[in-house]
Image (spheres, rainbow, N blue to C red):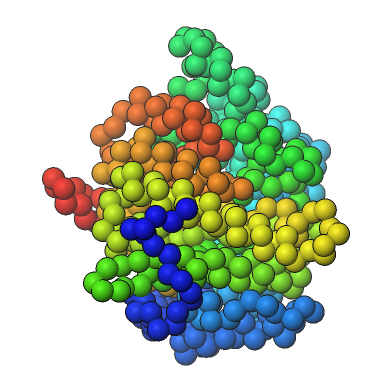
Amino acid sequence: MVSEDQRQCNSVNTELQYLFPSIHHVVPDNIVQRYLMNAGNKIEMYNRMIKFIMSKSSVKPVWDPTIIQREIFVPAGNTLVAGKRQLQPNCSILGTVTDSNLTQMISRATLIWKSAIGIGFDLTGCQDPVAVLKTLSELNHSIELEWSRPKRGNMATLSIHHPRVLEFIHCKSCSEEASQQLYNFNISVSVTDKFMEYALANPDNDESNLLFQIAHHAWKCGDPGLVFIDRVQDEHHEEGPIVTCVPCGEQFMHNNETCNLGSINLTNLLYQEDGQIYFDWNLYESAIKTAVLFMDQVIDLYQIPDQIMAKTAVRLRRIGLGVMGFARMLQLMNIPYQSEKALWWADHLAYKLTEEANRTSWSITSPNNSHRRNITVTCVAPTGGIRNLVDTDSYGIEPLFTQCSSIDPLFSVKMTAAWQKHLENSISKTINLANDVDVKVVLDVILEAYHSKLKGITVYRDGSRLFQPKKIKCDGDSCQLS
């Protein structure tokens, strides 16, 4: 699969001149407090985590610790605290909330949030989903964590067929105050294929009008997103129905499930030879193998406060291995993000990621086992905290931040689809839009996402919220953060 001009090196050669041989860069203070704690540097942090995992695991490790020490594979934040804090999954699904189980769900959510775990909820079983959403949001706001780990985000989904879906669609866009009140929840509407077919068949029926409402409010404030729920159900039905996803959309899971995340740092797989930059495909494969074995061992060391989730985690052993630094990798190789060559890389990297992760998961089981070790193995998470830890300026598969408004939105969907084609679970990726686009562009993005077989889609129009962390100012071809 690797062409001559993107050649694969013959072996994992430690004498190669890698572009990023050292990890001793300055780490932001908040990241030092969050992950390094009393460690003097990142090597000490990684060694503390590695030593803890190795000492507590009942299985002799067969993964390569240098893959972690060189920041080629980086576990997600809740694993980096191993040896200092209890090990917890990164995200979870409580699932279906109803008026009758709300009290129980609140009790369980409180314990989970205190352990810095984000939660996905589906509110379709509630008579007044917006009221329940506000209750959950206020509860989440009230949670105090015992250490410097930030509170986790959450997801609330609602079926398009709920009688009060319109209230849900505009609950975050009715005012800046409402958006701020619910900032700790992403919201998405679950739509069926039949709904989409009806919406596309007639530009003036109930379905098309609802779709326009979704697009309009997403244009207005970035919410809601869309979940193509039939596509999710078709591909993830092993344990029954799936009703919602994790806060950033990278994992669709069954009720009472958790996920362990981690990412391959693509920029640390680049090496230079004779003035040219190449990607080390063999080292990529080795990193994937180490990542899967490591993440699987971590699951057995969880101390999840919710007993139902704890049992499900060990039984299904869901992991989500993804990538980070994709746009930075392209930039270093002088490949434009918006190009056919970049799509080639996306397709091949995603294929190899899932192929090798699957092979490794099967290798852990006994020869007579008819099931692989982990229910799913690959997705692309947002990599927010660990991006700052490893000092790369690109999240997951997102373009570099100063590029994002200049990328054609439909190409962004095409890029997401190139990865989604091979990944088992989903992708955390926002389609970023310039401030002056109209609602039709959002509709076009939604339709392109549906036709491209994505599992979900979210958009964000620059400047559409007053309290936006970063804004982009462009003058011709030059863009800067402000």
At 54% from the left and 70% from the top, the residue drawn is: 287
Q: Residue furthest right?
A: 368
Residue 449 visible at all: yes
Q: Position of residue 79 (x, y in %)?
A: 61, 72
Question: In the figure, is residue 244 to the left or right of 369?
Answer: left
Residue 40 higher or lower than 57, as above or below: below
Question: In the figure, is residue 279 to the left or right of 125?
Answer: left
At 55% from the left and 21% from the top, the residue drawn is: 196
Q: How many numbered marks are there?
A: 0
Please state, as top left, top right, bottom left or bottom right, where the C terminus lies in the image: bottom left
Question: Is residue 70 or residue 218 the one in the foreground?
Answer: 70
At 76% from the left and 70% from the top, the residue drawn is: 300
Residue 320 visible at all: no
At 47% from the left and 40% from the top, the residue drawn is: 417
Question: Is residue 276 or residue 422 the one in the foreground?
Answer: 276
Question: In the figure, is residue 201 to the left or right of 390?
Answer: right
Residue 261 higher or lower than 62, as above or below: above
Question: Is residue 435 or residue 9 the one in the foreground?
Answer: 9
Q: Position of residue 446 (x, y in %)?
A: 45, 30
Q: Residue furthest left?
A: 476
Q: Position of residue 397 (x, y in %)?
A: 43, 53
Q: Residue furthest bottom?
A: 40
Q: Position of residue 119 (x, y in %)?
A: 65, 52
